[in-house]
Image (spheres, rainbow, N blue to C red):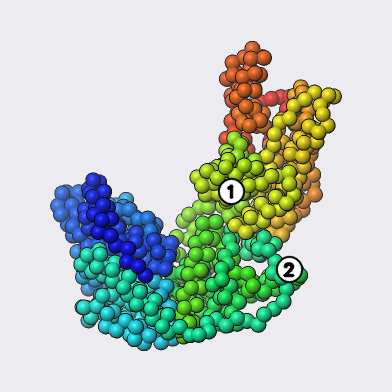
Amino acid sequence: MKNLWSDRAARAIARRYAKDGVNRDVALRVYTTRLLGGDPRLVLHGGGNSSVKTRVRDMTGEEVDVLCVKGSGWDMGDIEPPGLPAVRLAPLRELEALDALGDEDMVNAMRRNLLDSKAPNPSVETLLHAFLPHKFVDHTHSTAVLALTDQPDGATVCREVFGNRVALVPYIMPGFALAKACARIQRGHPDVEGLILLKHGIFTFGDSAEEAYGRMIDLVTTAERALRARRKEVVLAPAEAQGGRPPRVADIAPRLRGMLAFGPKDSPVRFVTTFRTSSAIRRFVDGAELSRYSQQGTVTPDHAIRIKPKPVILPRPSARDLDGFFRASARAIETYERKYRDYFARNNATQAAPRTPLDPVPRVLLVPGLGFFAAGNSARAAEVAADVYENNVEVITDAEGIGRFRSISEPDMFDIEYWSLEQAKLGSAKEAPLARQVAVVTGAGGAIGQATARAFRAAGAEVALLDLDERRISPLAEEIGALSVPCDVTDDAEVGKAFAAVASRFGGVDILVSNAGAAWQGRIGEVDDAILRESFELNFFAHQRVAKAAVAMMQAQGTGGCLLFNASKQAVNPGRDFGPYGLPKAATLFLSRQYALDHGAEGIRSNAVNADRIRSGLLTDEMIADRSTARGLSESDYMAGNLLGREVRAEDVAKAFVDLATAQKTTAAALTVDGGNIEAALR
């Protein structure tokens, strides 16, 4: 592992933060924390922590000794000074004299001593940092160190590898007891460079940020070299080869995603999934002893909060017999959930204060021959779970390379997964109305498409943007955290590829906003048939094409869904010389009702929005100018030419789509969004 310390960079960051009144100690703490947090072999997604003991002025102007320690919600990779809240040091150190301290009391003690009451909660390992005497303290979950400690004889291995450079701490759950144990062990070995917490991670410390960071890099490098030197010739021997071409990920993702959903049939609790594979992952999932090494537990305890203690192992799929794969997968998931409930009951019975059970759904699904799926309540959560399990794959592979992987005991794992501090968060965060759902928006590069994508993302949905020109949607995708997919919705193959991309990224589709369209004009008795056919291809058949693809995925998931069509007021109130546009739009309005009729029994709803006079690619600034002039009106009066006298905007149409998506008992409806055009009113 390379030491990335730079004197020049350290001086630059100290000067930069000095302008904001941040002292040099904290600035250098930010610098080396980012160096550690930028390497996934050391830290993943909010894991690890760091601290510095320094002096700052309180609100009275008095200089006080404080511990600036990583705060909850901050990531070491991009931390800023506010992510290191200052806590008065002396009161924290006085706590070491106590025989015991509960988690809630510990958190209260830390918050009472914050210099800024609005600061985030200090790390749960704050007392460990406080009780150690060193100025700078670093903590990571190094993959190399974990591979050495996660062995039946991990302590012996670590003594052989590190000698007297570190002291070993037996596994103790994070909190007050661990902090006291670490302080006691360090005092017994005052010259060590760090502490190895067995089956947990590594702490290093020093009088300077450079020294603490350098010791971390040196010790991790020592671990990496030991792994290479001790590695067995054969690691994760492959299972006996089985015939059959594997299926596409997109062909199995929606069905598996549906198997994970739970709750009432009319309002299921869904998960978003993502898929990962690589040569390392394939070696892992294709290993002959997968059922042994994958079921031992997580490589470091806090991973259980993200991915549960164990993954579920699914059968090896074959494209020739997908139905057999799905039946066996359903049984595997049912068995997993039953065993998880048994695990909860068994361990909850030993608790002084009963815990609230979490859902039993697996967060990681191993698929021999393919890779693994990770699930979460959002795309972000699924990606984090995937990153965490990929980290587990690396550590378990390395651990098996020198011996046998062994995690902590089941009761210890339960204590982490059902930690009182985590239990306190249950039910505290209300989910957005469309959370856990995946929405596809076609024509996403236009005004209505972009507004709709933003509205669905704001409502909690994961969003896939489809448009003929990817350049029109890539910036928006980056802005709102969506998936951009170039797609010509008049082409069967491109639509198939686009929906396969959505399934691979999110697991499936729950909502379709079929919005792509263009306005062809012409007097109906004179217009060329080619123009009429071209308009029907985009303004009708493309709607059918994407709806058919979406319904196929919704049926595979078995959790219902929602189709939304942009039908336009032209469908019921045709404009002169707009027949080439209005005729297919009228057919699309009927199409939305046909889907409601034919697929309602499957829980698939279908609705349409009729909008009028929206500034967009269909109604351009030039058209607005021409029409308002022809009517002798100002542009603003023309755009507000409705019963309410108000201009209707793309955002109003987007809100109508969201409202229909959340109206769980509304189908076969057409919602008018035009400010009041009585000629276009359906009822």
Q: Residue 432, image x and y in percent?
A: 54, 49
Could you classify mark 1 by the number of other residues whose Cα lies within 10 Å: few (under 14), some (14-19), or many (20 or more)?
many
Q: Tag 1, which secondary structure?
A: strand
Task: Give the amino acid at mark 1.
Answer: Ser
Task: Give the amino acid at mark 2.
Answer: Ala
- Residue sitting nearer the eye, 109 or 623: 623
Quarter of the rendering containing residue 163: bottom left
Q: Residue 464, image x and y in percent?
A: 60, 49
Q: Residue 190, image x and y in percent?
A: 21, 78
- At x 76% / y 70%, what residue is drawn? 320
In the picture, measured across the screen, residue 484 lies left or right of residue 113, that is right
Quadrant into which the C terminus falls: top right
Q: Tag 2, which secondary structure?
A: helix
Q: Which residue is mark 2?
A: 319
Cα–Cα gap, marks 2 and 1? 28 Å
The reply to whether residue 86 is visible in this rendering is no
The residue most toward the top is 632
- At x 60% / y 29%, what residue is drawn? 615
The reply to whether residue 36 is visible in this rendering is yes
Q: Which residue is mark 1?
A: 484
- Residue sitting nearer the eye, 477 or 598: 477
Q: Residue 417, image x and y in percent?
A: 47, 70
